[in-house]
Image: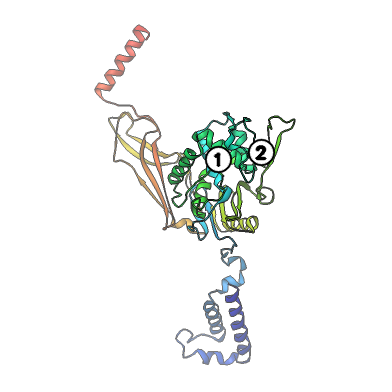
Amino acid sequence: MVIKRSIACILLFAYAFFYSGAVYSVQGAYSGDVAYSGLTASQAASKFEDAVLQSAGLSAEILSNPSAVPSMPPSTAARAAVVMEVSSKRVLYAKNPHMKLPMASTTKIMTAILAIEMGNLEDVVTVSPKAVGVEGSSIYLAKGERLTLEQLLYGLMLRSGNDAAVAIAEHIGGSVENFVRLMNRKAVQIGARNTNFVNPHGLHDDMHYTTAYDLALISAYAMQNPVFRTIVSTKYKKIPWEGRSYDRVLQNKNALLWSYEGANGIKTGYTKVSRRCLASAALRDGMQLVCVVLDCQPWFDDSATLLDYGFANFKPYTVVSKKQVLGHIPVRDGYEAQVAAVCREEILLPVREGEEKEISVEVKLPQYLKAPVKAGTKVGYVKVTLGDEVSIRKDLYTAADVKENTIRSNLKRIIDRWIDTEFGF
């Protein structure tokens, strides 16, 4: 863009210099050109100016209105990076999104969400010898120490305790090995098919890897869980320290929680091989973004820049509201002739200016239903697409009960009422 502007300026300067000395010859100079023939000198000059700008890839409107210049995707020192909107999973920025790389302690995002989904936060976990003295970052667990699963999760996500990761894995999976199998199974379910976990903490192993895209998918999935969001957005937390007269004071390692507007997660990671990795998250104007940078020395600065790009260039657009009626289905033999089909979830898309016009909404419903119909019956789906980038499908459900209206059903209701009245059943 800078080069294009420079070329445009040089050409415009050259044009202005020659035009000022030959203003009266402009009419003749362009009289043989079909595009300019029949124009006045000022009209021809204007046409020429537009042509110069267009040759540089610009327009007069853009130069006269700097805010009209499209925001260019920023550069990043990260080896791989992805910015993703959480609800739609739309990728807003990508650099080497499918390159397989080590992920260090961002591994613990999967460890945490599995523990939250499969465990009870009030469960008391007894620390085994295997969880004691794990190399790397630690919350210094002792053999036989007892903490709740929730307390261990804060130690895992705020202070990146590798010992907490092992204690959690053993509690949820019965063993670290079985827990790792659960991690890989969950990754496939989420759609992270280029990810392989070998351990629950992220200490380096050549077979322990992910991609920026996969880690963004895992992060987006996790950020939809309210318990997970609460934990990863916490700056400070005190948890017990058995055998001592004071508590452990945990401070979150994610500096963006203090420096970036709307920051609400997620997890730092570092090993000598992976170098600095960060999965971050921020919420602004109802739009939740996650940003993943792998092998990125200026991890906080670059993540902030990438998040800024996402918020500046995309705005949340509600395609379908929660409980919005998207159609009516005829009901045969029912007291009501039809029943409404609703979407239980909001469908929100991050869009560039004017892009909402390109969104396609397709609703699929059965031709009819047979009474009786129960509210909450799955009856079809809505599919929202935006070009080749976004395809979201959500189930639709009946909004109300519809009783059967036949001679047999009415007779049965009459008998049931009579029995209730006569015998008080």
| Residue 1, horizontal then vertical, whole percent | 58, 72
Say few, some or many: other residues with alpha carbon within 10 Å of mark 1 (under 14 / 14 to 19 / 20 or more). many
Q: Is residue 7 above or below residue 214?
A: below
| Residue 381, horizontal then vertical, whole percent | 37, 43
| Residue 400, horizontal then vertical, whole percent | 39, 31
Which residue is at the front of the view, 1 or 403?
1
Q: Is residue 210 above or below residue 10?
A: above
Q: Secondary structure at mark 1?
A: helix
Q: For the point 54% across and 43% down, which residue is it?
A: 200
The amino acid on which the numbered mark 1 sits, given as a three-letter code, is Ala
Task: Estimate the spatial distance between the alpha carbons at disc 2 and disc 1, rounded to whole Å.
Answer: 19 Å
Marking on residue 140: 2
Say few, some or many: other residues with alpha carbon within 10 Å of mark 2 (under 14 / 14 to 19 / 20 or more). some
Which residue position holds label 1? Answer: 112
Q: Is residue 42 above or below residue 286?
A: below
Quadrant location of residue 273? bottom right
**Left or right for 11, reference 402:** right
Q: Secondary structure at mark 2?
A: loop
Quadrant location of residue 328? top left
The amino acid on which the numbered mark 2 sits, given as a three-letter code, is Tyr
One can see residue 186 in this view: yes
**Left or right for 138, reference 120:** right
Mark nearest the camera among 2 and 1 is 2
Q: For the point 58% across and 60% down, which residue is it?
A: 78
